[in-house]
Image: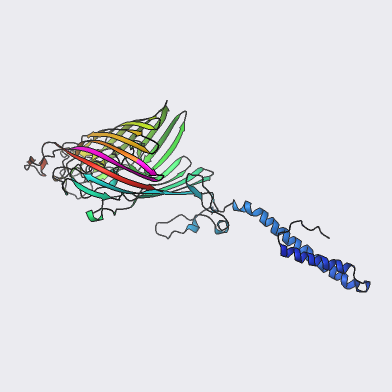
C-alpha cells in the first residue's frame, strides 16, 4: 500500500476514499472460497486508490505553485513594428492572454500608477480640466492660442477686431496624460503622452470652448536616453510660476522632436539634446523676399547644466544652431533673385531658484542672437516679423535677431492651502528695420512688459481655484497709424507707440 497524502482538499473525495478503504477491508476478511476473486478485486481497488492519490497530488502541487505563476508574465520577444497605415493590435506588442487572465490589478512603481495585469509595466493616468473667465481692459482679439495667451491682448493700432472691455468664459486648457514605466536590461523603459486642448485658437467667438487637440509631449525613454516630441532644455520650465491666467506667463519656451541624454555626478546634473533644425526668418519666410528657409544639415544643439549652491538651485541653458535661406531654386518673384545666406545662432539662459521654507524666489535672464523659441514675436505676437532673423532686402544677408528677456517671480504661502505669486517679466527684441511686414497689421513687437499677481487656494484635494490681475504693455515698430508713409511699397509705418492692456482672471481646475 502507498502512503495516503495527508492533504484533504475535498470532502467528496474523502467520502469516496473511505468507501474504497471499507470495501478493501471487507474483501480481506472474506471467505477463502472466494480468495481468487477477492485478490483481483483487492488489486483493482489498490490501483484505483493509487491513481486517485496521484491526481490529488498533482492538484495540490498546482494550487501551491499558482501564486508563483501569478507573479510571472510572458511578453513577445519581437513584437511587430507599429505601422502608420496598418490597424493597431495590442496583441502584437504586449502581454500574452494566458498569463493575464489570472492576474489581479496591483499598485505600480510610479505615484498613482497600477501594474498592467500579468506584467511588470506600471501605468498612470492623470490630467486636468479647467474653466476660466477673463475680462480685458485692452484691445481684445477674437482668437488666441492659450499656450502663450498672457499678454496677447496687446495689439497694434491697426488690429482691433473687438472693442475694449470684453468679457469671455474660457475652457481651453484641458488635458490627459498617460505614463508607463517598466524595467529592462537597458534600464527603465518609460513612455509619456500628454494630450491638451490648447493647440490653436478657436475660429469663432461662439465656439470659444472648442479647440484643437495636440500632443505637446510624446516621449519614450530607455535608461538615460529620451526620444520624441519634448520640451527644449534651453529652458528648465522653472520660469513659469503658478498663474490664474488661462495661458502661462511668457518666458523662453520651445518644443520639438529631439533626442536627449541625461546624466550627472559630483553634485551636477546635465542634459544634452539634439533637436530638429528649423529656420524662421520673418513671418512669411524671408522678409517678403520670397524664397525657402533652410533647416540646416546639422541638428540644433541644446544643453542644460544644473547644480545646488547651498539652498539655491542654479542652472544654465545653452543653444547653438545653424540656419539660413535660399532663393536659388524658387519661381517666387524676389527683389534679389538667386540670393542665399546662412548664419549661426546661439543663446544662454542662466537661472536661479531660492526656496524660502514653502516660499520660492526665482529669476532668469535669457539672451539669444538668432536663437529659436525665445523671440517675443514668436511667443506673444505671431503676426510679427523677425522671429529669429531678418534678410536685408538689398544685400540678401541675414541679420540675426537679438532678444533679451528677464523673468522673475515670488510665491508666498499664506497657509497650507492658500498662496500668491507675483510675476514680473519683460523683453527687448531688435529685428532689423526693414522688417515691417507687408501691411499695416504685422509690425514686429520690439518691447513688452508684464506684471501679474494672483491669489490661489485649494478648496479640497484636487480642486484649485484663484483670481488674478495682469498688466501688459507692448511696443510695436512703427505702430502709429496717423503717420503712414504712402510713398513706399509696401506702406511703411513711422514712429513707435506703446499699447497697454489690463486683464482680470478667474480660474477653477480639477485634477485627476
Q: Which residue is drawn at 25% across and 55% down?
A: 207
Q: In this view, does 495 lie to the left or right of 3?
A: left
Specify the farthest residue to the top.
Answer: 310
Magenta span has 199?
Answer: no
Locate residue 214, reporting x and y percent.
34, 51
Specify the farthest residue to the left.
Answer: 487
Magenta span has 466?
Answer: yes
State whether residue 327 appears in this view: no
Locate residue 182, reporting x and y percent.
51, 46
Which corner quadrant holds the N terminus?
A: bottom right
State whether residue 485 appears in this view: yes
Q: Residue at x 36, y 34 (%)?
A: 414
Q: Is the magenta stretch mostly helix, strand or loop?
A: strand
Colour pattern: rainbow
Locate residue 75, reporting x and y percent.
54, 53
Q: Nearer the viewer, residue 321 or 179?
A: 179
Locate residue 347, reporting x and y percent.
31, 33
Specify the farthest residue to the right.
Answer: 32
Q: Is residue 420 left or right of residue 492?
A: right
Give the magenta range: 457-476
Q: How many numbered callouts?
A: 0
- The answer to which quarter of the image holds residue 471 is top left
On screen, residue 173 above or below 253: below
Q: Nearer the viewer, residue 169 or 229?
A: 169
Amino acid at each position: 500500500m502507498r502512503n495516503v497524502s495527508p492533504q484533504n482538499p475535498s470532502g467528496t473525495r474523502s467520502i469516496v476514499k473511505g468507501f474504497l478503504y471499507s470495501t478493501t477491508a471487507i474483501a480481506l476478511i472474506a471467505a477463502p472460497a472466494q480468495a481468487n476473486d477477492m485478490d483481483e478485486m483487492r488489486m483493482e481497488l489498490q490501483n484505483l486508490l493509487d491513481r486517485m492519490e496521484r491526481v490529488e497530488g498533482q492538484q495540490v502541487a498546482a494550487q501551491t505553485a499558482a501564486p508563483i505563476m501569478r507573479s510571472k508574465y510572458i511578453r513577445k520577444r519581437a513584437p511587430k513594428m507599429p505601422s502608420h497605415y496598418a490597424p493597431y493590435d495590442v496583441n502584437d506588442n504586449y502581454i500574452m492572454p494566458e498569463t493575464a487572465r489570472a492576474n489581479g490589478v496591483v499598485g505600480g512603481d510610479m505615484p498613482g500608477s497600477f501594474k498592467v495585469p500579468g506584467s511588470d509595466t506600471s501605468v498612470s493616468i492623470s490630467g486636468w480640466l479647467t474653466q476660466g473667465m477673463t475680462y480685458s481692459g485692452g484691445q481684445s482679439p477674437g482668437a488666441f492660442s492659450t499656450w502663450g495667451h498672457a499678454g496677447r491682448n496687446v495689439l497694434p493700432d491697426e488690429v482691433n477686431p473687438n472693442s475694449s472691455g470684453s468679457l469671455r468664459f474660457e475652457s481651453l486648457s484641458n488635458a490627459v496624460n498617460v505614463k508607463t514605466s517598466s524595467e529592462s536590461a537597458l534600464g527603465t523603459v518609460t513612455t509619456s503622452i500628454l494630450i491638451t486642448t490648447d493647440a490653436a485658437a478657436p475660429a469663432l467667438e461662439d465656439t470659444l470652448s472648442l479647440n484643437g487637440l495636440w500632443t505637446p509631449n510624446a516621449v519614450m525613454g530607455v535608461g538615460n536616453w529620451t526620444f520624441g516630441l519634448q520640451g527644449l532644455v534651453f529652458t528648465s520650465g522653472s520660469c513659469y510660476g503658478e498663474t490664474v491666467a488661462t495661458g502661462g506667463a511668457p518666458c523662453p519656451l520651445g518644443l520639438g522632436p529631439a533626442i536627449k541624454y541625461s546624466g550627472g555626478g559630483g553634485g551636477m546634473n546635465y542634459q544634452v539634446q539634439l533637436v530638429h533644425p528649423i529656420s524662421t526668418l520673418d513671418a512669411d519666410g524671408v522678409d517678403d523676399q520670397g524664397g525657402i528657409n533652410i533647416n540646416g544639415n546639422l541638428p540644433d544643439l541644446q544643453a542644460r547644466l544644473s547644480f545646488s549652491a547651498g539652498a539655491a538651485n542654479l542652472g544654465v541653458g545653452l543653444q547653438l544652431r545653424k540656419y539660413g535661406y535660399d532663393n536659388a531654386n524658387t519661381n517666387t518673384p524676389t527683389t534679389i533673385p538667386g540670393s542665399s545666406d546662412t548664419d549661426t545662432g546661439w543663446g544662454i539662459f542662466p537661472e536661479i531658484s531660492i526656496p524660502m521654507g514653502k516660499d520660492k524666489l526665482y529669476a532668469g535672464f535669457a539672451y539669444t542672437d538668432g536663437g529659436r523659441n525665445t523671440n517675443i514675436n514668436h511667443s506673444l505676437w505671431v503676426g510679427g516679423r523677425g522671429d529669429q532673423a531678418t534678410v536685408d532686402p538689398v544685400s540678401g544677408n541675414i541679420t540675426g535677431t537679438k532678444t533679451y528677456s528677464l523673468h522673475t517671480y515670488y510665491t508666498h504661502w499664506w497657509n497650507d492651502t492658500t498662496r500668491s505669486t507675483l510675476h514680473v517679466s519683460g523683453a527687448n527684441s531688435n529685428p532689423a528695420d526693414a522688417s515691417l511686414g507687408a501691411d499695416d497689421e504685422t509690425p514686429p513687437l520690439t518691447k513688452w512688459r508684464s506684471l501679474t499677481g494672483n491669489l490661489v487656494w485649494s478648496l479640497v484635494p484636487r480642486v484649485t481655484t484663484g483670481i488674478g490681475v495682469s498688466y501688459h504693455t507692448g511696443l510695436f515698430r512703427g505702430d502709429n497709424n496717423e503717420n503712414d508713409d504712402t510713398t513706399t511699397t509696401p506702406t511703411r509705418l513711422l514712429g513707435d507707440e506703446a499699447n497697454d492692456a489690463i486683464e482680470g482672471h478667474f480660474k477653477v481646475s480639477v485634477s485627476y
